[in-house]
Image (spheres, coloured by chain):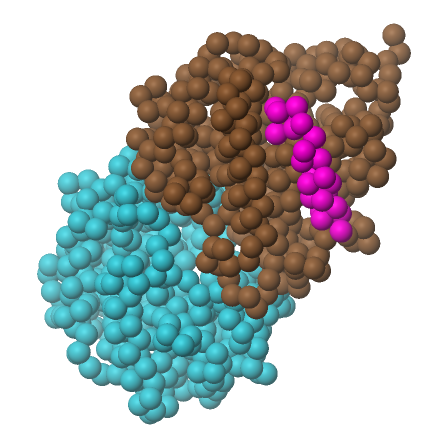
Chain colours: A cyan, B brown
Amino acid sequence: MEKSRLESLLGIYKGGLIDDVLPFWLKHSLDHEYGGFMTCVDRDGSLLDTDKGGWQQGRAIWTYANMWNFHEQKPEYLDAAKLSMRFMDENMFDSDGRMFFQLTKDGKPIRKRRYTFTETFGAIASASFARATGNDFYADRARNLIDLILKYNNTPGLVEPKFTGVRPAKGIGTPMIMMATCQELRAALDTDEWDDLIMRCIDEIEKDFVKPELEVCMEQVSPEGEIIEHIDGQTLNPGHAIEASWFILHEARYRNNDKRLIDLGLNILNWMWARGIDKEFGGLMYFVGLNGKPVQEYWQDMKFWWPHNEAIIATLYAYAMTGEKKYAEMHQQVHDWAYKFFPDAEHGDWFGYLRRDGQISQPSKGNIFKGPFHLPRMQLMCWKLCEDMLAGKFDKVKFKD
Amino acid sequence: MEKSRLESLLGIYKGGLIDDVLPFWLKHSLDHEYGGFMTCVDRDGSLLDTDKGGWQQGRAIWTYANMWNFHEQKPEYLDAAKLSMRFMDENMFDSDGRMFFQLTKDGKPIRKRRYTFTETFGAIASASFARATGNDFYADRARNLIDLILKYNNTPGLVEPKFTGVRPAKGIGTPMIMMATCQELRAALDTDEWDDLIMRCIDEIEKDFVKPELEVCMEQVSPEGEIIEHIDGQTLNPGHAIEASWFILHEARYRNNDKRLIDLGLNILNWMWARGIDKEFGGLMYFVGLNGKPVQEYWQDMKFWWPHNEAIIATLYAYAMTGEKKYAEMHQQVHDWAYKFFPDAEHGDWFGYLRRDGQISQPSKGNIFKGPFHLPRMQLMCWKLCEDMLAGKFDKVKFKD
């Protein structure tokens, strides 16, 4: 990649983050009355619904506290994190220590889910907030949440199951989100106490979900890592696997460019890119079938913002770690497609939901699943990757001049 | 409508039912080993998954037994119903009398759901099977299932709720499916024992879901029938309400063209047609927002087969009951759009899932939600409506010659 291209990309990512995306969500979604983020906003940022998603509270607190901690100490970032942590403290924990998935504006719980993802996002929020404020209460809470998540993930029957025990299955989401959560906690709390847990997550992904003979990273397998010969088991989520691939590359970098981890991350990226890229319209398909057969989801060919965010990070990370032209080309391909269709030039931020051909399907900017997380994380990660490449911090990336 | 047009439509519906759709599913989905229908089939009918959906078992048994009872005594229809009722008898009932939502090929339960819709389809299957075979065991079972469904619908807390009690809501699906179920039981078992229950369902729809001041039939309201000022409460499902409209017209016809019911059915049809028709691409949108705002579902603009089936029936029924040219035009509009995009000329049956512009999104013919039900029911209803109009059984429909 030319130095000038990297400089230009750095400007796009950093400028988009600081001048567009972070202000958009501060302006439109912050609840100055009860605290918390109301992320159900229309294209222009106007409120569609006052409900607060549990995932988005944790994710948005992390986004702003993490910016404050490591990148840009704007008072409004810390203020937003403090205001919203108050909402989390006062409303989001149930008596069993678990967290609510959806709440009213004033903090009444609407729904709690079986899965512990609200808790993983609560953990990264708490850890980054602990660093931002120096308050150990939040560091302890992050640690306790990890323990609680592990207990729920490892204790069958603790929540009433959705399915009978006839065809047990497990998803890649559990180890990959645990890995990413621990990586964030490590950064925020300056500790290696979860390094073994991170490696166990990667080992589980490699052993049970990655199938080199099929060149695939599965989304769901049996508890023993076998492919399940039914539609749900054959349904691949390329963007999700590609997200896992850069978590693994990130770990490889932390571990002195561990070759086994680099190879694993690159394999997942290469295989799932080949399976997920839409050869007709460009961009990444949401779901694809293992053997090219239809999957059950009827909207499987839609283009969502987040798989494109993850693929932009993963390809740039792969380039940074290897210096290989191939990854620079993949990065340009997904960056160009995404920046052609997703950004909203009129009102800012990105659209979330496009039809297969890139036309807008649903124009709102947020809901209880979309808020300031995947896009600003991509902008931040890629800004920093560009900066580090330009600063010569990646051995494999060299410039002519 | 010209007599010749009605004759031509009759041929399309009857021919499509008897020569295309019913044979397609008998050929491709019937399990001659364990009984039951395997409806997860690809475009060409080849099997994608051997799992059996609970809804589809009951619906398909009803489709074939009902054909045998009233319209065409082909041995393969009764054979299919018998073979599949064996699967239902042996596998589909849990120890609490409830039915499973998804099962393996050999009948092991994968999932049971909170909602009692598998049971409603089990009831119509049992009633039509009782008539086809003269076996009162199945008539009793149909009656018992109605009682069980009522018990579950009317006893809060009998199943663990998905949401907290902070914002209680009810859906139109419960009274409308109960009404349609009782209508089918009445026809199969020659009894008026559920006539009051049917009227209570219609009364509930009129009182709680229909809002004349807004010209809308809501999909979800508070238990007291109030509009819920949050996204889920503002999400309309025009095809679903239009389905309810013809159930009500059907009841009006049974009750000597009851004017109040005709007006109610026509209002729902008119209002939800105006809200659901896609003025840009034609066809019916899946979800629309009450105030034109985005709904939370990102695939809301897709075109599904079943809302078009229901709109074809409802507009033809409205024409039959009123003789008004307007309904003939609406019928032609939705019939023409649907027949342009949904039928698969190469392999038979209809595609289920189109993008907004009518292009195919997901090419499979079936899954645990799509099988031989909405389409053959539409073909049957419309065949019979055309036949009855041509035979002079609808007072308001007159021909020039």
Instruction: Name the one closer to the observer, A269 or B139.
Output: B139
In this picture, is A259 found above or below B371?
below
The N terminus of chain B: image quadrant = top right
x and y, in percent, of residue B266 in the image? 79, 37
Residue A85 visible in this rendered orientation of the protein: no
x and y, in percent, of residue A188 in the image? 28, 81
Instruction: Name the one closer to the observer, A332 or B191.
Output: B191
x and y, in percent, of residue B11 in the image? 65, 12
What segment is highlighted magenta in the picture?
B185-207
Residue extending furthest toward the right: B400
x and y, in percent, of residue B377 in the image? 60, 25
Residue extending furthest toward the top: B401
Residue shown at 29% from the left, 66% from the top: A152
Q: Is residue B290 left or right of residue B52?
A: right
Residue shown at 15% from the left, 52% from the top: A207
Image quadrant where residue B199 sits: top right
